[in-house]
């Protein structure tokens, strides 16, 4: 299971770290772990755990208040090999598989702040496009510095007129003698304030799926205006609306074929959704652990809270959901690792199931914590505020239900 101490905020409730860890170990030992983790995975876990203990836990509350991560954190994460996960060594990456992603999220989730993963790993939904489509020069200039943590990259797709309907993007790239000129607006862009590089989706000449093209845009270039957005959660993750006004893009910044971006974005969304599901399961476990320790320590009516049947049944229900989601997550990870086509519809189902689990578990954790669950300083309070963004990001629950229906062949007409 996740390494390191998880009990820091519980000092507010009078729960010792020793009691907390004993409670968690006792419950976690009830179900044997899936035998999918190699010594390499566990070595990576130790690396991430040390990074979290050293760099994140002492500072996460400050970053939440400042509503941004320091740029120095990216460099430290790059040096530790976190940012290169899933990328080829020749591009500056460290390799890895879906189980490494699960390990990464389990450890980063110990901070109890989804914005940490969202911003620190924001390149995870943009850089894969550069790795897959980029020329040797583009990879050297744009990908390698991002994986090293020297530059921050974001993906700019969602627009005020719609997020999931990629085929109807209104941002237009007009061809000209020196390349293209971008005009349009993107919103809800993670790392949109700090990003040095943006992978921007725009329609060449006019809207339509066949015209969607990807561009690598310099964040400091002309014609770009950024407006920070205030959010319910993910406070340490900067989010922005980005306006492009006659923004020039040279031909060497076109990523992949002109008009070929639509299908590539849809395929890219699959791994984004898997990542969101992995985050949801990791945060659900954090909530269940915190609530379990509280229920075993908190005294009400002369006995521990967990001694009351309604409370302990709530704890049991939470762990049932966590373990079920965790098993689903690992099943899909195995399918992805072996290249099974069945993984595609399963990812949509997993993302919905995992985020629904998080919503339920976080809700029950706050109820068990009572007043402490409503006070800032507990992980469950913050995670509860952040449940909805995981249900919305990468395609809302309803959108993914329709997508899965089409992928499973349930419809007479094909769902994109």
Image: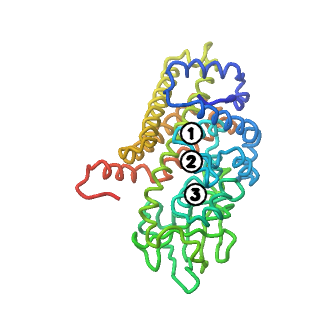
Give the CA separation, mark 2 to mark 3: 10 Å
* Residue identifier under label 2: 86
At label 2, counting other C-alpha atoms closer than 10 Å, the crowd grade (few under 14, some 14-19, many 20 or more) is: some
Q: Secondary structure at mark 1?
A: helix
On the image, which quarter does residue 194 sit in?
bottom right
Toward the left, the furthest residue is: 412
Front residue of 211 and 280: 211
Give the CA separation, mark 3 to mark 1: 17 Å
Quarter of the figure that contains the N terminus: top right
* Residue identifier under label 3: 127
Seen in the image, is 315 located left or right of residue 8? Answer: left
Please give the label number shown on residue 100: 1
Please give the label number shown on residue 92: none
Residue drawn at (70%, 20%), measured in percent from left and top? 18
Residue drawn at (70%, 27%), measured in percent from left and top? 13
Q: CB of mark 3 within 8 Å of CB of mark 1?
A: no
Q: CB of mark 2 within 8 Å of CB of mark 1?
A: yes
Q: What is the x, y in percent for residue 193?
A: 67, 62
Q: What is the x, y in percent for residue 140?
A: 64, 62
Position above or below: 408 against 290 = below
Q: What is the x, y in percent for residue 412?
A: 22, 55
Q: What is the x, y in percent for residue 305?
A: 58, 19
Position above or below: 20 against 69 = above
Q: Secondary structure at mark 2?
A: loop
Toward the top, the furthest residue is: 302
């Amino acid at each position: 299971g996740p390494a390191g101490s998880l009990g820091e905020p519980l000092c507010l409730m009078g729960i010792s770290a020793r009691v907390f860890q004993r409670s968690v170990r006792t419950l976690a030992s009830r179900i044997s772990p899936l035998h999918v983790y190699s010594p390499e995975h566990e070595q990576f876990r130790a690396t991430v755990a040390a990074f979290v203990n050293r760099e994140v836990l002492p500072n996460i509350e400050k970053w939440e208040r400042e509503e941004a991560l320091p740029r120095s954190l990216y460099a430290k994460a790059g040096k530790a090999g976190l940012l290169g996960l899933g990328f080829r060594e020749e591009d500056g990456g460290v390799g890895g598989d879906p189980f490494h992603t699960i390990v990464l999220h389990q450890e980063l989730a110990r901070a109890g702040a989804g914005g940490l993963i969202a911003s620190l790993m924001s390149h995870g939904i943009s850089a894969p496009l550069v790795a897959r489509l980029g020329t040797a020069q583009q990879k050297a200039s744009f990908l390698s510095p991002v994986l090293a943590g020297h530059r921050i990259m974001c993906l700019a797709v969602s627009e005020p007129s719609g997020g999931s309907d990629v085929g109807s993007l209104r941002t237009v790239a007009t061809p000209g003698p020196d390349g293209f000129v971008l005009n349009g607006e993107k919103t809800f862009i993670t790392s949109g304030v700090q990003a040095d590089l943006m992978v921007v989706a725009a329609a060449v000449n006019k809207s339509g799926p066949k015209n969607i093209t990807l561009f690598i845009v310099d964040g400091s270039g002309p014609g770009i205006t950024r407006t920070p957005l205030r959010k319910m959660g993910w406070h340490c993750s900067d989010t922005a609306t980005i306006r492009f006004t006659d923004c020039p893009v040279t031909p060497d910044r076109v990523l992949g074929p002109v008009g070929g971006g639509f299908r590539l974005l849809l395929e890219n969304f699959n791994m984004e959704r898997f990542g969101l599901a992995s985050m949801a399961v990791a945060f659900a476990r954090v909530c269940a652990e915190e609530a379990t320790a509280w229920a075993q320590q908190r005294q009400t009516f002369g006995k521990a809270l967990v001694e009351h049947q309604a409370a302990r049944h709530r704890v049991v229900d939470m762990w049932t959901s966590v373990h079920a989601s965790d098993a689903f997550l690992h099943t899909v990870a195995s399918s992805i690792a072996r290249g099974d086509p069945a993984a595609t519809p399963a990812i949509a189902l997993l993302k919905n199931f995992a985020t629904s689990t998080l919503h339920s578990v976080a809700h029950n954790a706050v109820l068990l914590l009572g007043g402490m669950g409503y006070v800032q300083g507990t992980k469950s309070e913050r995670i509860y505020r952040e449940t909805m963004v995981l249900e919305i990001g990468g395609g809302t629950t309803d959108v993914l239900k329709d997508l899965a229906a089409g992928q499973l062949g349930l419809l007479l007409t094909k769902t994109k």
